[in-house]
Amino acid sequence: IYSSTDKVYGDSNRLPYSEDSKLNGINPYDASKVCADILARSYALSFKMNISVTRSVNIYGPGDVNWDRIFPGTIKSLIKNQKPIIRSNGKFLRDYLYVDDVVDGYLKIAKFMLSKKFKSGIVFNFGNNKPISVINITKLILKKFNKSPNFFKILNKSKNEIKDQYSDYKNAKKYLNWYPKTSLNEGLNKSINWYKKNIRT
């Protein structure tokens, strides 16, 4: 199973992304993912290897300590009673998926790859198809901490960011009977509880 990303689709006039959307990685990270994605599927075709590709939206949940990401960064700031920082203009739409739902998807792929119905090289989007702006995510987290909805800073300094990103999950639904089970509210509560237990103030 090759773990790719929804960023391989890049800027697109066609949203939500589907598994047959054009690959259009525009910055080095995205382009590297596109290349590996294509290579994985070429090996599936050329060498008859059992390979599948996943393209996930933004994953969040306990254990994520990349503080530059919106969920851990915002929660850590609030635990320390600091204003969260939004690097973009905050208006970009993103799709978010709780980590347990991703794990469930991977386990179902592994089982599916052992079945006679599996077709090597198949691609699975994992997403919610429920886009929300970065500002609104921040405000949801602020509410959990009983903070003012304006208790944040906008830097508006991010470059080469894809404006809007969100995905459907048609193949996962069709072949795996997979769908996201964790609501954003539930996932936020679980995440905040984990960070409160693991971040020293």
Image (cartoon, rainbow, N blue to C red):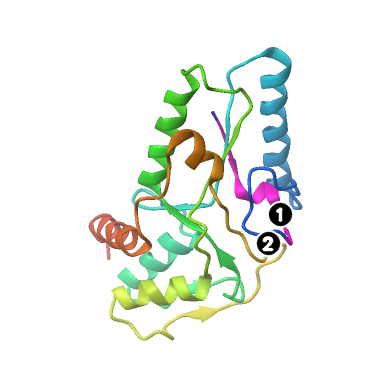
Which numbered marker is on residue 10? 1
The C terminus lies in quadrant: bottom left
In this view of the protein, which residue sits in the foreground, 98 or 176? 176
The residue that appears at 37% across and 71% down in the rendered structure is: 141
The answer to which image quadrant residue 147 occupies is: bottom left
Looking at numbered disc 1 in the image, what kind of residue is underneath it?
Gly
The answer to which image quadrant residue 196 occupies is: bottom left
| Residue 8 shown in magenta | yes
Vertical position of residue 89 compared to residue 35: above or below: below
The residue that appears at 71% across and 40% down in the rendered structure is: 34
In this view of the protein, which residue sits in the foreground, 183 or 10? 183
Vertical position of residue 12 compared to residue 92: above or below: above
Which of disc 1 and disc 2 is earlier in sequence? 1
**Bounds of the magenta segment:** 2-13
Pointer 2 residue:
162
- Mark 1 Cα shell of 10 Å, populated few (<14), some (14-19), many (≥20): many
The residue that appears at 76% across and 52% down in the rendered structure is: 26
Label 2 to label 1, Cα distance in Å? 6 Å
Q: Under tag 1, what secondary structure? A: loop
**Rendering coords of residue 12 (x, y %):** 73, 58
Looking at numbered disc 2 in the image, what kind of residue is underneath it?
Ile
| Residue 151 shown in magenta | no
> Is there a contact, CB below 8 Å, between mark 2 and mark 1?
yes
In this view of the protein, which residue sits in the foreground, 138 or 197? 138
